[in-house]
Image: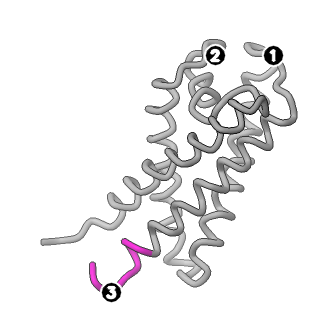
């Protein structure tokens, strides 16, 4: 049976969004930040009505896409320091997403968010990257599944 690693990478990317949402929910419950990761992503579709389930669907797609692109990128940059590279690429993806989000939605359709919200989401992106790196290391780049 052929092992489809890009599909597995996409699934791992989707699953890695869950700890990110969990961490952001903890911060939100403590009064740090305004939107969880899923709520913020849902605003891309709803513009001004945060919805966790809409954000879940969108975030699973985005996480899977980022993981698949990163899987192919690893062929060029190598697999050493895998967890660190995953964390780094997730921070870069966060920066791109925040830039696009801030330029298109924030201030036009929703109020400008507090600075703490950015910290919550960058920590969430870091957790996503660490989780993705650990999953890649465990399930994609071991000799037992080749």
Horizontal arrangement in the rendering, residue 14 relative to residue 38 (left or right): left
Of residues 104 and 110, the one nearer the viewer is 110
Horizontal arrangement in the rendering, residue 103 relative to residue 143 (left or right): right
Q: Residue at 62% across / 55% down in the picture?
A: 127
Q: Residue at 57% across / 40% down in the picture?
A: 21
Q: Residue at 33% across / 67% down in the picture?
A: 5
Above-or-below relation of 57 to 136: above
The CA distance from mark 1 to mark 3 is: 50 Å
Q: Earlier in the sequence, mark 1 or mark 3?
A: 1
The range drawn in magenta is 138-146
Of residues 81 and 70, the one nearer the viewer is 81
Outermost residue, left direction?
1
Q: Position of residue 26 (x, y in %)?
A: 65, 38
Q: Which residue is mark 1?
A: 111
The answer to whether residue 146 shows anywhere in this view is no
Outermost residue, front direction?
30
- Eye-nearest disc, 3 or 2: 3
What label does residue 143 carry, if any? 3
The answer to whether residue 45 shows anywhere in this view is yes
């Amino acid at each position: 049976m052929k092992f489809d690693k890009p599909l597995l990478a996409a699934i791992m990317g989707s699953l890695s969004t869950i700890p990110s949402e969990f961490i952001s929910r903890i911060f939100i419950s403590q009064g740090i930040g305004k939107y969880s990761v899923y709520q913020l992503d849902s605003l891309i579709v709803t513009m001004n009505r945060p919805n966790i389930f809409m954000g879940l669907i969108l975030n699973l797609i985005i996480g899977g896409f980022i993981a698949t692109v990163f899987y192919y990128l690893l062929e060029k940059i190598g697999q050493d320091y895998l967890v660190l590279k995953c964390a780094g690429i997730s921070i870069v993806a966060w920066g791109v997403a925040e830039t696009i989000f801030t330029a298109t939605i924030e201030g036009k359709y929703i109020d400008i968010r507090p600075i703490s919200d950015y910290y919550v989401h960058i920590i969430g992106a870091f957790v996503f990257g660490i989780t993705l790196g650990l999953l890649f290391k465990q399930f994609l780049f071991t000799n037992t599944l080749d």
